[in-house]
Amino acid sequence: MVKAGKIAFLCLLLMSMYVLAVNAQDGPKATPGDFVVKDFKFESGEMLPQMKIHYVTLGTPQRNAAGTVTNAVIINHGTGGSNTQFLGRGFAGVLFGKGQLLDAEKYFIVIPDNIGHGASSKPSDGLHAKFPHYCYHDMIVAQYRLLTEKLSVNHLRLVMGTSMGGMHSWLWSEMYPDFMDAAMPLASLPIEISGRNRYFRRMMIDPIRNDPDWQNGEYKTQPIRGLTTAIYTLIMMGSAPLQMQKQMPSKAAADAAFDATMKQRLATTDANDLLYQVDASRDYNPEPKLETIKTQLLAVNSADDEVNPPELGIVEKQIKRVKNGRFIMLPITDETRGHGTHTIPAIWGKYLGELLQASQK
């Protein structure tokens, strides 16, 4: 059982959707900040008197003779994530160091905690289910206001993101088509949330809402039954069968890993926050406006991604409608980690380099 416990611990590190959100830093130090927006109005018509967007930056903005920022990059996290997933050695240590693709001495890197996530305003702060029902468009408007109003960034060299952040990259390219030179959506599809992906989300939303202990969001202790079912689904969405079999080759190892994972997730997940995070995708659908995208766009998915499986062939079809679009499907290897491949730039970094070169002005 000692061996199984060790395997479980390794699995916990490798198979989490946010596997690379480690604390160790390799490279430049991130500077945290907060942007408080007064009377932020959501698409739903709801309003928040004070909405806080927490963020970190690396590097310094540079401007050309016309006053346009030339080196700003925004990186957006996935559902349930935060800026920390990009600050460990597996991401920052591969991209942000001296001489690397997004060298913080050359680029001004902005990584927000999006609405409902991390240290930004979210339901668990106190409003619970009375928190405004934000959607992806609201999140991107908040990102735009952070850049333009707080950080005085009037142009982006690159917008990129993982999972939900990948979907944000598609929407950024349509909502602000002249604001960026390049976009790199990772682990996403340019269509509305449908099919099995929508099933996954309903399998998280419904158990929480239908748990009597949820009490319309005013629970005193977490609605454990609904939250447990939701976390089961979340784990399956981010799973990578090949790697899980390698790391948990016995029943004892799999059971130990499962128990450890559930203990950690239940201790760190708030039901209202998760409910809102998953439901926020309800307005996502870049498909009708793909022809309006002007920027150089490179979409990257992986063949072992259970959320965006390759057999759908969706990006291959839709990317043809993007004037400057390109799509890469990463094959399954010993290095890929299912949906979590999106946060391993050692695998897809060369394509980022090609995008930066192709979009250079």
Image (spheres, rainbow, N blue to C red):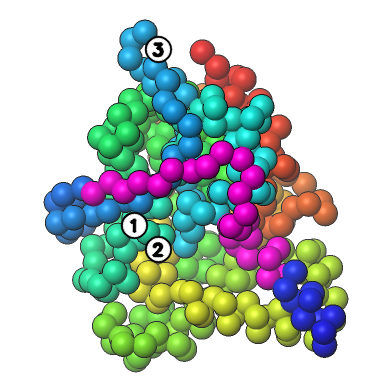
Q: How many marks?
A: 3
Q: Could you tell whether 236 is left or right of 35 in the image?
A: right
22 drawn magenta = yes
Instruction: Report if residue 43 lies within the magenta region.
Output: no
Residue indicated by mark 2: 277
Callout 2 secondary element:
helix
Residue 157 screen position, x and y as percent: 47, 26
Q: Position of residue 327 (x, y in %)?
A: 63, 35
Query: SS at mark 3?
Result: loop
Q: Is residue 226 above or below residue 317?
A: below
Q: Nearer the viewer, mark 3 or mark 2?
A: 3
Mark 2 burial class by Cα count in 10 Å: few <14, some 14-19, many 20+: many
Tell us which disc is closer to us: 1 or 2.
1
Secondary structure, mark 1, is loop
* Quadrant in which residue 262 is drawn: bottom right
Task: Answer left or right for 76 relative to 306.
Answer: left
Instruction: Inspect the image, locate mark 3, and give the three-letter code of the amino acid beneath it.
Output: Asn
Whether residue 115 is visible to the viewer of this picture, yes or no, is: yes
| 69, above or below 78, in the image | above
Mark number, residue 64? 3
Sequence-wise first label, 3 or 2: 3
Q: Residue at 36% of width from left, 8% of height from top?
A: 65
Q: Write the residue at 51% across / 39% down.
A: 160
Label annotation for residue 120: 1
Compared to 202, does 174 lie above or below?
above
Res 179 label: none
How crowded pointer 1 is (Cα within 10 Å; few <14, some 14-19, many 20+) is rated as many
At which x and y percent is residue 159?
47, 35
Q: Write down the region rendered in magenta.
A: 11-36
The residue under the point 79% across, 74% down is 7
Which is more N-terminal, label 2 or label 1?
1
